[in-house]
């Protein structure tokens, strides 16, 4: 069976342009257009190494269950069965979270497998499905918007195409159902030359970032230093952290460029994912410009619901900064948990949550300043660039928490300080 890596193999690009041509020519018929996109996406993701028919079947089954629940939630009478509707939506979201946890967390998977199928798997066996993190967030988004009855152009083919759209399948960007389905509803093949030019330009940028710039940085990254943490000196750690930070940016933003460019060739717009994050003067603006589709998802579906719930308590209504900071910290702890199982990811999320919370307090105090000289400084370019430098270095230090387990981090910090 044909197997290739996305964006790195010439066969991917040949098939992408073939699919784009067929998809564009089928645009005069909405049904044919959707069917072409659906089957081409399925065939493309089945060509991914380590992604097989069993993985696809499982994701499809979960997707069909999600669609059936979302379909009922989206069409039910708002004036009736509110409690039942809430229970169903909560149950569906909890089920998706448990599925995600099963494939993300080795200890959880081992506990479930050993309980249900004792001795069926070796201790070293671990089941993981490519794309599970992003497809789970798409399905959770779908159920929440269905609960709000905000879904449009609802159809099973649109939904499955949305889940398995191959340019964004592996690592996003996390697009939204309504925006995607609206583009499928267009039956005119307009602006194909503009889309082709924009898409190819974006692909070239992405390839340059990943193949050239990221490749230059990677050998110096801290994760590639051929020493144990106890043997690294301060210079190696500092250079390694900066190199790894820049590598992650070029690699991930390059991937996003490739996904966005590939989709654009087909006439589909994906959301932007990066906007010069390392040129932002504070950590809030950095996160608003880094992995933007994930940040927006976390804001919409964790931060705001949590803030709304906390606001029901009189204490938090009187202390909006405390309310906001608790919501921010919890949101980023969940963000850390989503990135992986080890404790260091939770600490990384806590680190950024606390940084944003401190910024919240700082900005509140900053607004109280009346000294015109200080206010003039805050509006100057010098203040902006001081903020840029401090923010970037704050983010770089966080990469240490992202890169190593807690024991290694402890060892490195002792050596550095």
Image: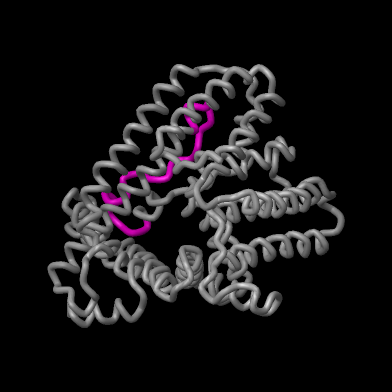
Task: Give the residue displayed 25% in from the left and 48% down from the top.
Answer: 215
Which quadrant is home to the C terminus?
A: bottom left
Q: Is residue 316 left or right of residue 204?
A: right
What residue is rendered at 64% in x and 63% in y? Answer: 99
User: Which residue occupies 21% across, 72% down?
Assistant: 227
Residue at 83% from the left image edge and 49% from the top image edge: 76
Q: Which of 365 and 232 is in front in this view?
A: 232
Image spot of residue 233 (x, y percent): 14, 74
Decide which of 198, 320 is in the foreground and name it: 198
Task: Report if residue 390 lies within the magenta region.
Answer: no
Please provide percent x and percent y for residue 118: 67, 79
Residue 372 shows in this picture: no
Does the rendering let one see residue 82? yes
Q: What stretch is highlighted in magenta?
A: 263-284
Residue at the front extreme, as displayed: 1
For the N terminus, the image quarter is: top right
């Amino acid at each position: 069976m044909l197997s290739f890596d996305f964006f790195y193999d010439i066969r991917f690009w040949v098939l992408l342009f073939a699919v784009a041509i067929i998809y564009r020519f089928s645009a005069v018929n909405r049904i044919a257009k959707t069917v072409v996109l659906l089957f081409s996406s399925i065939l493309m993701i089945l060509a991914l190494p380590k992604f097989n028919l069993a993985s696809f079947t499982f994701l499809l089954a979960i997707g069909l269950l999600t669609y059936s629940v979302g379909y009922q939630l989206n069409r039910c009478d708002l004036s009736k069965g509110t409690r039942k509707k809430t229970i169903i939506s909560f149950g569906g979201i909890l089920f998706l979270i448990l599925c995600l946890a099963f494939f993300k967390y080795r200890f959880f998977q081992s506990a479930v497998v050993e309980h249900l199928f004792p001795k069926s798997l070796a201790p070293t066996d671990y089941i993981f499905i490519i794309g599970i993190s992003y497809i789970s967030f798409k399905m959770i988004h779908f159920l929440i918007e269905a609960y709000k009855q905000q879904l449009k152009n609802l159809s099973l083919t649109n939904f499955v195409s949305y889940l398995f759209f191959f340019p964004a399948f592996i690592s996003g960007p996390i697009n939204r159902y309504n925006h995607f389905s609206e583009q499928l509803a267009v039956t005119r093949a307009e602006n194909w030359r503009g889309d082709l030019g924009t898409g190819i330009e974006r692909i070239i940028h992405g390839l340059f970032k990943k193949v050239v710039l990221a490749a230059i940085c990677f050998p110096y990254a801290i994760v590639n230093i051929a020493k144990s943490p106890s043997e690294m000196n301060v210079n190696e750690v500092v250079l390694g952290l900066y190199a790894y930070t820049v590598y992650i940016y070029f690699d991930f933003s390059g991937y996003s460029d490739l996904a966005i460019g590939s989709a654009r060739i087909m006439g589909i717009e994906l959301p932007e994912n990066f906007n010069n994050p390392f040129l932002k003067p504070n950590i809030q603006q950095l996160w608003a410009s880094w992995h933007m589709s994930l940040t927006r998802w976390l804001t919409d579906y964790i931060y705001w619901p949590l803030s709304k719930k906390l606001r029901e308590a009189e204490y938090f209504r009187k202390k909006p900064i405390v309310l906001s900071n608790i919501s921010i910290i919890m949101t980023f702890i969940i963000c850390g948990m989503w990135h992986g199982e080890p404790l260091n990811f939770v600490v990384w999320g806590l680190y950024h949550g606390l940084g944003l919370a401190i910024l919240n307090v700082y900005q509140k105090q900053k607004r109280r300043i009346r000294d015109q000289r200080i206010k003039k400084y805050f509006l100057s370019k010098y203040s902006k660039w001081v903020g840029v430098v401090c923010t970037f270095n704050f983010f770089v230090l966080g990469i240490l928490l992202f890169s190593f387990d807690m024991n290694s981090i402890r060892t490195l910090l002792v050596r550095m300080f």
